Image (cartoon, rainbow, N blue to C red):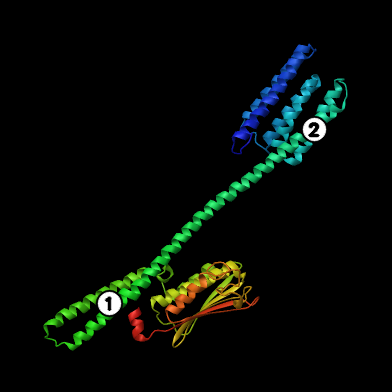
Amino acid sequence: MDTRTPTHVTTGLRLCLHALLVGLLVLAAVRAVSDGIGHSTTVAVLAASTAALYGAGALAPVVQPHTRAAAVWLAGLGALWLALLALSPDALWVAFPLYFLQLHLLPVRWGLPAVVVTAGAAITGFLLHDREVSPGTFIGPLLGAAVAVATVLGYDALFRESDRRRELIEELVSTRAELAGAERTAGTLAERERLAREIHDTLAQGLTSIQLLLRAAERTLPEDAPAATHVRRAREAAQENLAEARRFVRALSPPDLEHGSLAGALSRLSSRTSTPELTVQCAVSGTPVELPLPYEVALLRTAQSALANTVRHADARRAEITLSFMETSVSLDVVDDGRGFDPSARPEGPGTSGGSEPAGGSGPTGGFGLPAMRARARSLGGTLSVESAPGQGTAVAVTLPLPSAAGQEDAA
């Protein structure tokens, strides 16, 4: 009679209801036979018929709450009970389990009127049998109806609350798994980026220096010098290993930079971040030049961190990423029209958001977003600035000096 997952409590309550109704029907039949009333056989047959119909409905899978089959089944039970009540006053007590069935299987707008009608029929049946009228004649059925209503409605409320808590727990478990996956991905990307920087700053630069020194030594040696061949081979080996180191650096670069330029990566970032509530645009000014990988990584990570904070805290409707190539420097600006903030009131300063948290999502007492962006810019000889005011949006700007032609060739 119920599609909800059974528990020990619900199963026990259901068995008690079955036993109560069948026990009251048996009581009515036994009393009729023992008292020797004229319709004792009819009462026994009606009681047995009611019990049989009840058992069939309890076992039928089609009898479910708020279905037509349940309504038809209850109507049949009600008709048999009324016939039994007309012959035996002891059938009055069967009304109590009927209250629970009506409230459980019918919608509230039909269940409550059905309980009222059943209580009225029970009182009327008792009066028709010329029994002594007392306050209990009216209080008993009405009090039983009130108890049934409070019990069923209270149980349904508890079940709904339990179901909501179960859904919240499932959502929490799912969110925790997604968060753990995101943290693993972020950790992997951060480690790849760290290894790329280490290889570039140590191994690649060292091999570049060795290659330049060997080239200078090769020029100073006569062509027929016995050591010239060894110096040339050493220089070629250093050149090959330098190329291999650069391939490692490219392989460990952020995925957004693997399939295109920095401008393309920023354009894809703006497209991914745009939502119906937030429009993000990307623009490039000046003549694009090829930048060393550390420059591209620093600018991309700055844009990602600033935009992430805009989405989380700024309550902005528009944001714009601008990549500008100038003669001696390259700059990245991330501007939003969010709620803004007072930079002087935050010693660690937020990123582009104006929200309650600094860039990168840490707490208001200091975060790792802005220091990380400053550290990236400082490591490449650049600067980072934040401009904002309450209600006037926020702008984050990072400027990096362009390397010289020779330095760019070595850093590539």
Give the camera-side residue of 381 and 18: 381
Badge 2 density bin: few <14, some 14–19, many ≥20, Cα 10 Å: some
Q: Which residue is mark 1?
A: 207
Q: Position of residue 248 (x, y in %)?
A: 33, 69
Q: Is residue 276 left or right of residue 51?
A: left
Quadrant (top left, top right, bottom left, bottom right) of the N terminus: top right
Q: Position of residue 345 (x, y in %)?
A: 61, 75
Give the camera-side residue of 30 and 198: 198
Q: What residue lies at 22% left-to-right and 82% top-to-bottom?
A: 214
| Quadrant assignment, res 107 | top right
- Residue 83 visible in the current orientation: no
Q: Is residue 45 above or below residue 214?
A: above
Q: What residue lies at 46% left-to-right and 86% top-to-bottom?
A: 326
For marks 2 and 1 on the same chain, the one whose residue lies earlier in the sequence: 2
Q: Amino acid at mark 1?
A: Leu
Q: Is residue 172 left or right of residue 148?
A: left
Q: Amino acid at mark 2?
A: Leu
Using the numbered discs, state the Cα–Cα distance from disc 2 to disc 1 in whole angstroms. 94 Å
Secondary element at tag 1: helix
- Residue 279 visible in the current orientation: yes
Quadrant (top left, top right, bottom left, bottom right) of the C terminus: bottom left
Q: Is residue 372 left or right of residue 394?
A: left
Q: Is residue 182 above or below residue 145?
A: below
Q: Position of residue 374 (x, y in %)?
A: 48, 76
Q: Is residue 23 above or below residue 145?
A: above
Q: Which residue is mark 2?
A: 143
Q: What residue lies at 47% left-to-right and 58% top-to-bottom?
A: 181
Q: Are marks 2 and 1 in contact (CB under 8 Å)?
A: no
Secondary element at tag 2: helix
Give the camera-side residue of 49 and 226: 226
Labels in figure, total: 2
